[in-house]
């Protein structure tokens, strides 16, 4: 397991998720779910302003994708992530997507980092990269 002191600290306030902060088993379970059915990545976001003032940012993102509505609901109960959509394709099960970005993604990564196995290195890389701000301006 990781020691607490090697988890990178960030220099900005993070949202508090009581469901994850309170129970160790919730953090372990979510870490396992993200390892198995999730993604830890960076994505580009462009502001909706007119072209002259348009900015592009790279932000950290956590995504959970599953065909199980029960698993999706459990992840949502623990995280309250903001973005949700369903993907319906012919002759396939419905796929559910739940995701979060920026400070919420960073806060969740910090809480589940000790319990990640497969995606631990990617999470550490992102936590170190976004130590000063939860975004990087790219344009």
Image (cartoon, rainbow, N blue to C red):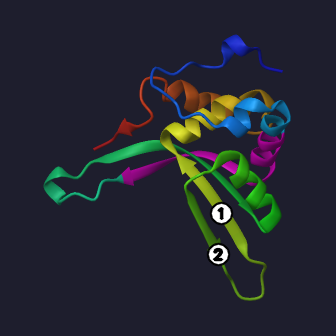
Furthest-left residue in this view: 52
Mark 2: secondary structure: strand
What numbered label is drawn on residue 81? Answer: none
The residue where tag 2 is placed is 87
Estimate the x, y position of residue 122 in percent, counting from the top left. 65, 35
Estimate the x, y position of residue 18 in percent, counting from the top left. 67, 36
Quarter of the picture containing the N terminus is top right
Furthest-top residue in this view: 5
Kindly identify the residue that appears in the image at 76 percent across and 14 percent down.
Answer: 3
Kindly identify the residue that appears in the image at 72 percent across and 46 percent down.
Answer: 78
Estimate the x, y position of residue 92 in percent, counting from the top left. 77, 82
Measured along the vertical axis of the image, is residue 106 above or below residue 98? above
Magenta-colored span: 29-45
Kindly identify the residue that appears in the image at 80 percent across and 59 percent down.
Answer: 71
Measured along the vertical axis of the image, is residue 2 above or below residue 88? above
Position of 59 compared to 32: left or right?
A: left
Q: Examine the image and state in which quarter residue 112 appears.
A: top right
Furthest-bottom residue in this view: 90
Kindly identify the residue that appears in the image at 66 percent across and 19 percent down.
Answer: 7
The residue where tag 1 is placed is 97
First along the sequence among labels 1 and 2:
2
CA separation, marks 1 and 2? 8 Å
- Asked if the residue at tag 2 contacts the one at tag 1, i.e. Cβ–Cβ closer than 8 Å, the answer is yes
Estimate the x, y position of residue 65 in percent, counting from the top left. 71, 60
Q: Is 37 a magenta residue?
A: yes
Quarter of the picture containing the C terminus is top left
User: Of residues 123 and 110, which is closer to you in this image?
Assistant: 110
């Amino acid at each position: 397991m990781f020691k607490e002191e090697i988890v990178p600290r960030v220099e900005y306030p993070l949202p508090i998720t009581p469901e994850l902060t309170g129970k160790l088993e919730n953090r372990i379970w979510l870490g396992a779910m993200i390892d198995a059915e999730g993604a830890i990545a960076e994505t580009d976001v462009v502001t909706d302003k007119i072209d002259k003032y348009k900015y592009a940012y790279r932000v950290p993102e956590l995504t959970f994708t599953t065909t199980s509505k029960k698993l999706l609901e459990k992840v949502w109960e623990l995280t309250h992530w903001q973005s949700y959509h369903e993907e319906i394709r012919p002759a396939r099960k419905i796929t559910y997507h739940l995701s979060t970005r920026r400070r919420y993604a960073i806060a969740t990564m910090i809480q589940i980092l000790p319990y990640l196995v497969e995606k631990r290195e990617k999470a550490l890389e992102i936590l170190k990269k976004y130590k000063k701000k939860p975004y990087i301006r790219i344009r």
